[in-house]
Image (cartoon, rainbow, N blue to C red):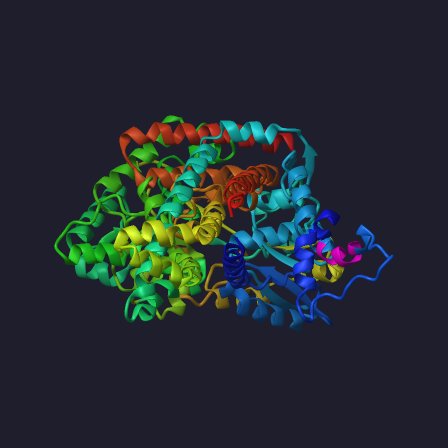
Amino acid sequence: MTATSVRPAGAGSEIASRPGGRRPRVAGRPRPAFAAIPFLIPALVLVGALLLVPFVSTVYQSLTRDNGFTSTFIGFENYSRLLQDPTFLQSLLNTVMWTVGTLILPVGLGLLIAVFTNSMRGGRWLRLAFVLPYAMSGAATAVIWGFILRSDGALNQAIAFLGFTPPASGWLLEWPTNTLVMILANTWQATGVTVILFLVGLQSIPPETVEAGSLDGATGMRLFWHIVLPQLRPVTIVVIGMSIANSLRVFDLIWLLTKGGPGGVSETLAVTMYRQTFIISDYGYGAAVAVVLAIIVVASSYAYLRRQLKGV
Amino acid sequence: MIGRKSVLKRVGATALALGLAASLGACSQGSASTSSAGGSTLTLNGDRADFVDAYKVAGDALAELGDYSIDPRNVPSTENYQQVIRSSLQTDSTTDLVKWWNGYRLQDLARSGGLADLSAEWDTAVDEGWVNPDTKDSFSYDGKVYGMPMYKSYWVIFYNKKVFNDVGITPPTTWDEFLSNNEAIKAAGVTPLFGTQEAGWTSFIWFEEILSKLDPDFYSKLMAGEAKYTDEPAQEALRIWGDLYAKGYFTAPDIAWDNEPALFQEGTVAQVPMGSWRNGIFVTNGMTEDDYGAYLLPVIKEGTQPSVITESGVIAVAAKSAKKDEALKTMGNWLNPEVQSAWVNQIKDTSANPEVVTDDPTLTSISEQVAAEKPVELVRFWEASPPPLIEGGVQFLASYMVDPSEDNIMPTLEKLQDLADSEWAKWKAAE
């Protein structure tokens, strides 16, 4: 940690040369590296108490048989059970579907909406329609979509009103339909934040570069593809990174719409973790799912960000 | 490069702010489960918002008898509630009294050591004639009583009298009449039966009702782990259930459970199977005896022993309660007729004290039918087997409700049996 407090010489001189910048260091008194430690303690204590301790205790719990009252150490039995559990494998598959769906829909739509409403007249008002759902909680979103998607809900009533026959199987009852419609419901809510982030990115693009491109004869898609999009790369990295993390931890919408059912077919890892822990009271098994989920989230975020941030 | 970095910084800051806002928004107020109340009041934790006023009324009645009154708290979600109790019972920040379930759910809690022994208070209630001593097992673990019955709900079919009058039918006394009623109701454009898996637990209701009316003895053995889900009676029960689905008698399996009282009241659904505890909501919604009634589902084959599913919540005393002795003493009077009549008239359900009668006409009619038919009383599915088996089992039954076909009968029952094998083994290993 102390290594991060050592400032490269170049950056230091840049700040020192600014009026009102850092005072010049007193000669002959080299600052020891550990001088930063006291300043790091509050952050270390917070991260340690709120993140590391619970994580270590969850890892330990995943190696036990724990019903909430008594706990016995059983080694890796919970993990071997996971591999043989069809619900867990289904839940893994659904999690992958959510990740892919969330990458394509909210990110793609967010980019489109941001680009079109950025240069469009009255775009800021149109944009509100897409951004406002983000202000709603996941639970409220689920309640609204519940009204729409249930067999006696608004969607089927609308289909019947228009003279068509609603699907007999219902929207939330069969896999993969239920997972797909829930990804769509999530898109409705999650697109808002990607729109905001892409707009920040778009507004940070120096107008000279776009002007230069236009003068050279680039228009439309060509201008977008070769001039605008490359300059959006930093923001895209953040948006995709957030989307991956969000899709892996999606819970509230699924829990309120299907409870992961029927029969566990629409569960994701976060739902499986909750159900095993708090419904079945198999705390050890639930903790094992939590550890697997944590590994996937950290590994995918690390791999993605490490690769992407190299070039920035 | 510097330009890109500053863009990244701006984006990062915005993302952080938005993420923080989202996570703060997602935070909800924690539940207050802790601490004893001051003075001569006992705290009670429960998961039924509609019971909160009734706890106070019962507490006032207890206070008049010289005991402690009740200061109730409520955790609205049953799932969160179970979690709160499991963690708080192990600490001295538990409430003095805890609402819980009878049967295996009570045993699960009792064997953890979190509950105080109420055997002496139970024996007093039996001596006074305040409770049926035959029901003791349902409130015991290892020979000791750990909970006093809160109520005694009978599982019945509530029916909308207006729909029945319009169609020109009466409550069925045989299974054939039940079927012909459904046909007539359906022909009149009303959905005959309510059934949903939306709330999770609700998927066991029709399985339990049909199986217990088909073969009550098998139902008891199955619940006790002495028979197999793959046995013939269970197959037959799913076949009958699937047949009712095929005839189009049921609501869609994803219909919201919370909408059930409204659908029943407006006559969109003619009949709902539910414990008599549901009666309180119908009354609160303004339904009267002219609007609805209740009947016991007839046996499927003539000559079968009539049966009725029963359910009793319990009030237990936390072993680590700061006022354990006072709480035990107070629970000694819980089944006192004066307390019970105040309590059941508020919750609109049947008392576990056979001496106490309610003034509710529907409940009176249920009690009369039970007295006349003398059905064997069976423990509800929810409390009749180890909790992990039930919680896992309702998932498979929910899947069957979505695909109630002949081809899905054996796969459903085989999954249930596999789960039963593993969960019974775990339960017995922990004994």
Counting the numbered discs, the total is 0
Q: Compare residues A264 and B387 and report the one nearer the observer.
A: A264
Locate residue B362: give its quadrant: bottom left
Q: Name, please, the residue furthest toward the left.
A: A163
Camera sees residue B296: no
Q: Where residue B14 appears, x then y in whole percent? A: 51, 61
Q: Name, please, the residue furthest toward the front.
A: A216
Which residue appears at 42% of the width and 43% of the height? A99
Question: Is A299 on the left-hand or right-hand side of A25?
Answer: left
Q: Compare residues A296 and B430 and report the one nearer the observer.
A: A296
Q: Compare residues B372 and B269 and report the one nearer the observer.
A: B269
Q: Where residue B319 appears, x then y in whole percent? A: 72, 52
Which residue appears at 21% of the width and 42% of the height? B247
Look at the image and say whether residue A173 sits in the magenta stretch. no
Is A46 rendered above or below residue A292? below
Camera sees residue A138: yes
Is A86 rendered above or below residue A208? above
Is B407 rendered above or below residue A101? above
Q: Where residue A226 appears, x then y in whole percent? A: 34, 49
Which residue appears at 59% of the width and 48% of the height? B133
Q: Compare residues A50 and B74 and report the one nearer the observer.
A: A50
What range is drawn magenta here?
A36-43
Magenta: main secondary structure: helix
Q: Where residue A78 appears, x then y in whole percent? A: 59, 31
Locate residue B241: give its quadrant: top left
Locate residue B158: give its quadrant: bottom left
Is A96 rendered above or below residue A41? above
